[in-house]
Image (cartoon, rainbow, N blue to C red):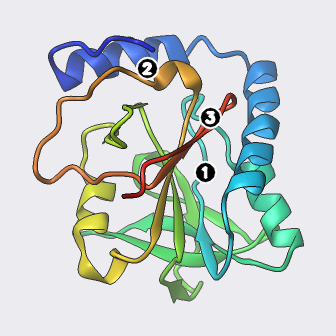
Amino acid sequence: MTPAPSTKQALRERILARRDLVSLALREKNALQQRDFALEGLNFKGVIAGYRPVRREADPTPLLRELAERGLMLALPCVMEDRRLIFRQWQFGDPLREGAWKIEEPLKQAPVVKPDMILLPLVAFDPQGQRLGYGGGYYDRLLADPAYERARRVGYGYEFQKVERLPSEAHDARLDYVVTEAALYRFLD
């Protein structure tokens, strides 16, 4: 477990630099291991929101593909002009467009849905279920919305992104689970 630096920005920089060194082959191998841990330990039902990985983020694609084959509805996040996140229905083969931060998202014609489980990318996490993201607050704002209080929050990352303790603030959203290539962590009360 990596000790946490004193500031969120220092931690972001250090972990993102390490994540940039993850080879594509290792990322693919880890994605399959993460899929297996998730399928063994999580109860998938309803609408599952994933994300399109960027910058060598942990890749949920193998898990999403398996869930689609099992008949579950998938969704991806879309950034609105007011910096809110919404989720639009998506399935493999649907066209995508470049959204905010050059991240692919469903077309505006795709129906807006409310997920039952949200897979979240992360920069770091700790044993208390705190998540550190990129600093834009998109997921923190979303998860603070009462409409999403029942959605399961599943961080998706690498084992080296686990730190002893994250500096946290009142608006930081706590995770229910984190899936890495080595384990499924559970943080539910």
Residue 177 percent across, percent down from the top left: 50, 50
Q: Amino acid at mark 3?
A: Thr
Q: Amino acid at mark 1?
A: Arg
The image shows residue 109, relative to residue 142, as above or below, that is below
User: Disc 2 to disc 1, how far (Cα)?
Assistant: 17 Å
Disc 1: CA contacts within 10 A as few (<14), some (14-19) or many (>=20): some
Give the camera-side residue of 51 and 147: 147
Identity of the residue drawn at 76% across and 47% down: 35
Q: Earlier in the sequence, mark 2 or mark 1?
A: 2
Label 1 belongs to which residue? 52
Label 2 belongs to which residue? 16
Residue 70 percent across, percent down from the top left: 86, 74
Identity of the residue drawn at 29% across and 18% down: 11
User: Disc 3 to disc 2, how far (Cα)?
Assistant: 16 Å
- Asked if marks 3 and 1 touch (Cβ < 8 Å), the reply is no
Q: Earlier in the sequence, mark 3 or mark 2?
A: 2
- Label 2 secondary element: helix
Disc 2: CA contacts within 10 A as few (<14), some (14-19) or many (>=20): some
Residue 62 percent across, percent down from the top left: 80, 49
Q: Amino acid at mark 2?
A: Leu
Residue 1 percent across, percent down from the top left: 45, 14
Q: Earlier in the sequence, mark 3 or mark 1?
A: 1
Label 3 belongs to which residue? 180
The image shows residue 96, relative to residue 28, as above or below, that is below
The image shows residue 17, relative to residue 122, as above or below, that is above
The picture quadrant where one finds residue 32 is top right
**Left or right: 56, with 33 as reference point:** left
Q: Nearer the viewer, mark 3 or mark 2?
A: 3
Identity of the residue drawn at 82% across and 68% down: 93
The picture quadrant where one finds residue 23 is top right
Q: Quadrant of the C terminus?
A: bottom left
